[in-house]
């Protein structure tokens, strides 16, 4: 038997555990007799593993099973480097580095020169109905195979990378996948009715049983590999139970393909299926590897499972991919790297990276990146690759310190962010962080944020995350309904984040066509405070959002005397204001429209302010926050009730008042609006408070009366106002 002694580490799934000395039923245990699955030899757990009687006692298990010693390297790949997600991919990158540094190391691929078709006994016709979802599909038939346990060398290779051997056919497809990075799939040839393989989607709601025995309901965009009658495999993700290779299989159809990453990613997430194949396909596979991997696997199957190749390779490749053409400027290369590299060295590095030089001139090079480098699409990517291979440590640090004298102070963005966050949190707000990716459908039929300006993703995770946000409003409304559904209706929220949009008549292929701006959003809904024995519940109001938003501007050093506000007509706000300073927009605020609230199933008023953070920060550098002692002289308050035309806004009154009385008018505020009975048609009444102050002396009654007379006269002459008694 096999015994794990004290101190041995075994695994239960992915979790390691150490064998310790213990007492079981009163007896001291010095180890554990193991079953096959506990040793990772197989999945069998029917009982302890019994060895032949002539097995030498005390022999280490590694020697008995002839386990080879090997070195395991764990690589932490960035998502864009899927080309290195295989042994040959890593070796290719190492060979490029060695070649660029003068070594004669070359990558040697396992040969497939001996591949040949033995007969044409079992041809299979392939039909590609969904070309946009499958860029290349290839396959062949191998007959007379014998499905059995894999040889030790193959099982050990798979176990060394954490995979459990299944049978020789499946093990070979997994081995080739990890060797060269190309996913493969083997079908039971007897299950391919009509000798037809069709790549297509199935109707929504179609039932399909996968290899794990679960019945799944297909989406209309799930790409399927089908025979003449039914689906056999969820393309690039998971095989079907009926068409899978079993011990009785004698003929297989071997698939090698290149699928659209968007389709695979969406399908994988819809069904919660995350496999080695989907991991590679959804990041972009190499179409040039399809045939090589197919031949490599076919030769291994002939070697380890017997059989004959009984059909030509069927290769459907409607639009061959040649890679990406890129212009490399010598000037930009030197500027981004920080030094001028020898042109011959640059060419050597490019050649080592399989980046072809199409032409060259005095200005630079015209290049063609290989299809497997899905991350090398522009000049900056090429320069990054050159620098990576050349070596970051080989760039000398300059002994010079370059600096420029700043005439005007530059705002400290981080400091200002912390100041405003602290202010809002102190006022009872909570900070939220919403996804910059949003549903593009939110902007349909919007006049303020036009759908045509939405920055769309070419490779979205889902239709709910297919565009970049133009405003922080929708993310805030999603947060509000999420909390209201969980019995949290009273909310005071803020978010500082980036918003994105296309410029007018922009070319989406040009980087400068896009606009990125920082915004600060403030949202309020529900009760201002919880009710108590001293007061009833009081809901938040327009005045509350206005006060908090204006306090942000004040804290940034922008005085209320500097800006002016006016009514805003926006489809997303039923009542709104826009704040301007010297034709620069500071913010917009108002009540979210009923139509939009209904769209989010919110049945309570929501007050919203969106501050143009970039504009406010740049202006804050010119408006220093000054602190002064409290005035020793009293303020004077006077109220006026004005009868005005419906079209006159409070912003008009405020602007005229500040223009008329610049010296002593400290503030002006609206405390009541009346429309209805006892007023002339088309009229409304504003009740306004004026605060007057002289910082050098106490205002006299005559001064106060004269100021109010001047203000009243201005309102009557320019706005047609009448004083109400």
Image (cartoon, helix red, strand yellow):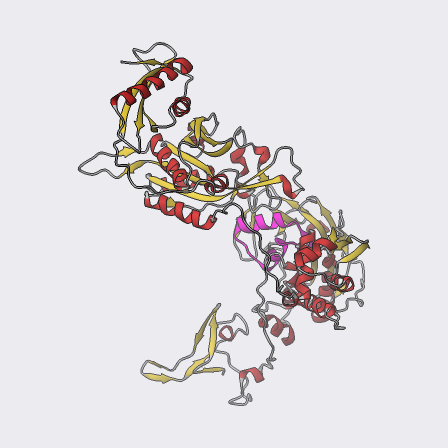
Task: Please identify the quadrant where the C terminus is shown.
Answer: top left
Q: Residue 338: which quarter of the image? A: bottom right
Residue at coordinates 57% horizontally, 33% vertically from top-left? Answer: 451
- Residue 216 location (% of width, % of height): 53, 49
Above or below for 44 versus 502 = below
Whether residue 140 is visible: no
- Most foreground residue, 232 or 399: 399
- Most foreground residue, 163 or 242: 163
Asked if residue 265 is among those painted magenta in the image, a careful observer would answer yes
- Residue 704 location (% of width, % of height): 29, 22
Residue located farthest toward the top when viewing the structure as drawn: 680
- Most foreground residue, 259 or 310: 259
Q: State left or right for residue 80 relative to residue 291.
A: left
Q: Residue 33: which quarter of the image? A: bottom left
- Residue 594 location (% of width, % of height): 42, 28
Residue located farthest toward the left when viewing the structure as drawn: 533
Q: Residue 648: which quarter of the image? A: top left
- Residue 364 location (% of width, % of height): 77, 54
Above or below for 256 versus 433 = below
Asked if residue 38 is among those painted magenta in the image, a careful observer would answer no
- Most foreground residue, 556 or 346: 556
- Report the span colored magenta: 256-285
Residue at coordinates 39% horizontally, 17% vertically from top-left? Answer: 714
């Amino acid at each position: 038997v096999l015994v794990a002694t004290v101190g041995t580490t075994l695994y239960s799934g992915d979790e390691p555990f150490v064998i310790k000395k213990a007492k079981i039923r009163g007896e001291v245990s010095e180890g554990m007799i193991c079953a096959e699955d506990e040793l990772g030899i197989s999945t069998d757990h029917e009982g302890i593993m019994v060895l032949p009687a002539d097995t030498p006692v005390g022999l280490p298990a590694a020697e008995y099973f002839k386990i080879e010693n090997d070195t395991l390297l764990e690589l932490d790949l960035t998502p864009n480097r899927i080309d290195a997600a295989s042994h040959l991919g890593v070796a290719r990158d190492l060979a490029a580095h060695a070649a660029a540094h003068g070594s004669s190391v070359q990558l040697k691929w396992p040969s497939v020169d001996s591949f040949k078709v033995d007969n044409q006994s079992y041809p299979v016709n392939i039909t590609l109905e969904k070309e946009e979802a499958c860029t290349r599909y290839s396959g062949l038939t191998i007959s007379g195979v014998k499905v059995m346990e894999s040889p030790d060398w193959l099982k050990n290779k798979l176990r060394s990378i954490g995979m459990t051997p299944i049978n020789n056919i499946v093990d070979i497809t997994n081995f080739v996948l990890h060797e060269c990075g190309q996913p493969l799939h083997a079908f039971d040839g007897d299950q391919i009715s009509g000798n037809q393989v069709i790549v297509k989607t199935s109707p929504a709601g179609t039932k399909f049983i996968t290899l794990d025995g679960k019945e799944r309901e297909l989406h209309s965009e799930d790409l399927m590999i089908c025979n003449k009658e039914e689906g056999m495999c969820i393309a690039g993700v998971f095989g079907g139970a009926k068409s899978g290779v079993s011990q009785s299989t004698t003929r297989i159809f071997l698939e090698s393909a290149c699928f659209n990453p968007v389709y695979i990613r969406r399908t994988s997430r819809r069904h919660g299926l995350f496999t080695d194949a989907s991991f590679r396909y959804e990041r972009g596979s190499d179409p040039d590897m399809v045939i090589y991997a197919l031949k490599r696997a076919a030769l291994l199957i002939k070697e380890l499972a017997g059989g004959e190749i009984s059909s030509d390779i069927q290769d459907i490749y409607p639009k061959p991919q040649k890679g990406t053409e890129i212009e490399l400027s010598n000037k930009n290369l030197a500027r981004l790297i920080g030094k001028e590299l020898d042109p011959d060295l640059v060419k050597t590095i490019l050649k080592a990276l399989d980046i072809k030089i199409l032409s060259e001139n005095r200005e630079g090079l015209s290049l063609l990146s290989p299809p497997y480098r899905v991350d090398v699409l522009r000049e900056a990517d090429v320069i990054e690759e050159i620098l990576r291979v050349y070596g970051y440590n080989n760039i000398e640090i300059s002994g010079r310190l370059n600096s420029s004298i700043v005439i005007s102070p530059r705002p400290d963005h981080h400091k200002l962010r912390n100041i405003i966050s602290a202010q809002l949190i102190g006022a009872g707000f909570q900070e939220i962080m919403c996804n910059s990716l949003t549903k593009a459908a939110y902007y349909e039929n919007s006049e303020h944020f036009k759908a045509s300006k939405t920055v769309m993703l070419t490779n979205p995770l889902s239709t709910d995350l297919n565009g970049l946000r133009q405003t922080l409003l929708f993310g805030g409304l999603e947060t509000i309904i999420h909390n209201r559904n969980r019995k949290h209706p009273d909310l005071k929220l803020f978010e500082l984040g980036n918003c994105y949009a296309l410029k007018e008549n922009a070319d989406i292929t040009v980087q400068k066509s896009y606009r990125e701006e920082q915004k600060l959003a403030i949202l309020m809904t529900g009760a201002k405070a919880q009710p108590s024995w001293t007061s009833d519940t009081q809901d938040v109001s327009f005045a509350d959002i206005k006060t908090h938003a204006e306090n942000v501007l004040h804290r940034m050093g922008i005085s209320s005397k500097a800006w002016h506000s006016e009514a805003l007509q926006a489809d997303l706000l039923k009542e709104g204001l826009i704040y301007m300073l010297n034709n620069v927009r500071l913010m917009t605020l108002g009540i979210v429209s009923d139509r939009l609230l209904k769209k989010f199933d919110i049945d309570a008023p929501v007050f919203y302010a969106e501050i143009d953070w970039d504009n406010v920060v740049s202006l804050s550098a010119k408006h220093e926050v000054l602190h002064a002692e409290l005035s020793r002289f009293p303020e004077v308050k006077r109220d006026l009730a004005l009868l005005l035309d419906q079209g006159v806004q409070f912003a008009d009154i405020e602007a005229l008042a500040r223009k008329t009385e610049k010296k002593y008018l400290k503030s002006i505020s609206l405390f009541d609006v009346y429309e209805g009975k006892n007023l002339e048609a088309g009229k409304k009444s504003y009740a306004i408070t004026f605060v007057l102050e002289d910082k050098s002396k106490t205002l006299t009654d005559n001064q106060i009366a004269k100021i109010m007379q001047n203000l009243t006269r201005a309102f009557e002459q320019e706005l047609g106002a009448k004083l109400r008694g």
